[in-house]
């Protein structure tokens, strides 16, 4: 009898596709996908069923900018549709890269991307206090005009200009969870929960409605990984291990992190606000929901990390 395959959720950042300024075109992004997806195929070959989740920050920014530039001629694109557009395009890139890699290795496996909605609570306090900046910088006059005519929330962003801000509500449930798992049980490698999922609410009639919001993709991935009882939640990032005293002479790269130590370092502000901090918080979220094991490392070291040879390992 063959050994039972293990289940992993691998969260890949949207910045993994946009590695440097000037290399932002779709062919550039696909080339970047082709560097990461072979490591996912390595996992599949080594007994793992894999669901790949991904960020979409830069890609949503590109769509919003195109929408702004063409607003005199074409309809603007609501934020939930920006999310669904990126799930399609990034999902297509990952799916194509995976299937080409499977074929090159003579594997019969298939990949599929699923457009995924994430339910949020329509009464989430984040809707009353939007803080997530999106879209282009504007001068104050333009920002206030959008506020008055389009109902936008706007704020001044660190002296660089004004930007639109939207809510970042907590993810409650991944609506396509069962569909994704049916595909996994059929032997597919699945791409889903892109950009944290398209944020939706249930209206008073029980119908699904998209909302203008952004869900933290690491938190949504953590919720999804714990909900499907994944054996491993792996966050792929730019560094091999998590560090304290990062960028300082006494930097310390961590092989293991307990929940208690992770909370202590978070309280000390050891992890970058827009970089490592949300990843560590997502791992803690996963473990506190009953998750088993988590790992943070870079794509090149995913398989070595799963063997315990590198990366930063978290256990409850």
Image (cartoon, rainbow, N blue to C red):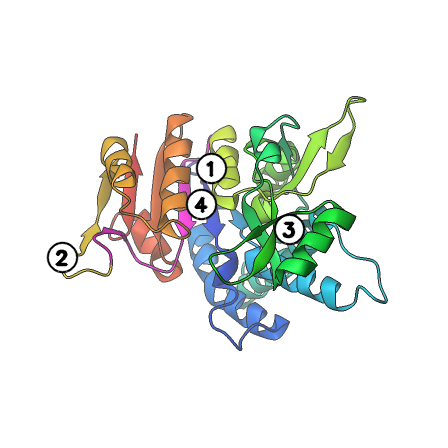
CA gap, disc 1 and disc 3: 21 Å
> Label 1, on which residue?
222
Q: What stretch is highlighted in magenta?
A: 229-246
Task: Determine the image quadrant of residue 170.
Answer: top right
Q: Nearer the viewer, residue 175 or 285?
A: 285
CA gap, disc 1 and disc 2: 31 Å
Counting residues from the N terminus, which is met first, the one under dot 4 or under dot 3? 4
Which mark identifies residue 112? 3
Q: Do the residues labelled 1 and 4 touch (CB within 8 Å)?
A: no
Judged from the image, the secondary structure of the residue bearing numbered disc 1 is helix
Instruction: Return the x and y of residue 184 as percentages of the image width and height.
Output: 58, 41
Asked if 19 appears above or below 180 in the picture, the reply is below
Query: Who's the residue at 47% across and 72% down the image?
Result: 20
> Label 4, on which residue?
48
> Label 2, on which residue?
250
CA gap, disc 2 and disc 4: 37 Å
CA gap, disc 2 and disc 3: 44 Å
Judged from the image, the secondary structure of the residue bearing numbered disc 2 is loop
């Amino acid at each position: 009898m063959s050994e039972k395959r293990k289940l992993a959720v691998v969260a890949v950042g949207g910045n993994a596709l946009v590695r440097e300024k000037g290399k932002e075109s779709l062919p550039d992004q696909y080339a970047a996908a082709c560097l990461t997806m072979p490591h996912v195929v390595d996992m599949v070959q080594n007994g793992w069923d894999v669901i790949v989740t991904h960020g979409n920050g830069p890609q949503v920014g590109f769509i919003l900018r195109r929408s702004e530039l063409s607003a005199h001629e074409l309809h603007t694109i609501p934020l939930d549709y920006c999310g669904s557009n990126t799930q399609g395009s990034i999902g297509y890139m990952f799916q194509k890269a995976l299937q080409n890699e499977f074929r090159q290795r003579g594997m019969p496996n298939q990949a599929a991307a699923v457009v995924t909605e994430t339910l949020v609570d329509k009464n989430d306090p984040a809707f009353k206090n939007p803080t997530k900046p999106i879209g282009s910088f504007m001068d104050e006059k333009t920002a206030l005009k959008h506020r008055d005519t389009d109902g936008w929330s706007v704020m001044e962003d660190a002296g660089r200009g004004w930007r639109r801000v939207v809510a970042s509500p907590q993810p409650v449930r991944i609506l396509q969870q069962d569909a994704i798992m049916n595909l996994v049980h059929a032997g597919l490698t699945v791409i889903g929960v892109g950009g944290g999922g398209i944020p939706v609410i249930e209206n008073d009639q029980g119908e699904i409605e998209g909302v203008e919001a952004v869900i933290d993709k690491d938190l949504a991935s953590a919720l999804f990984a714990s909900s499907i009882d994944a054996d491993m939640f792996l966050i792929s990032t730019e560094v091999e291990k998590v560090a304290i005293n990062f960028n300082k002479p006494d930097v310390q790269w961590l092989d293991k992190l307990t929940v208690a130590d992770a909370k202590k370092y978070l309280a000390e502000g050891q992890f970058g606000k827009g970089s490592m901090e949300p990843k560590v918080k997502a791992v803690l979220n996963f473990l506190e929901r009953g998750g088993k094991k988590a790992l943070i490392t870079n794509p090149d070291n995913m398989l070595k990390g799963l063997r315990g040879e590198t990366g930063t390992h978290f256990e409850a």
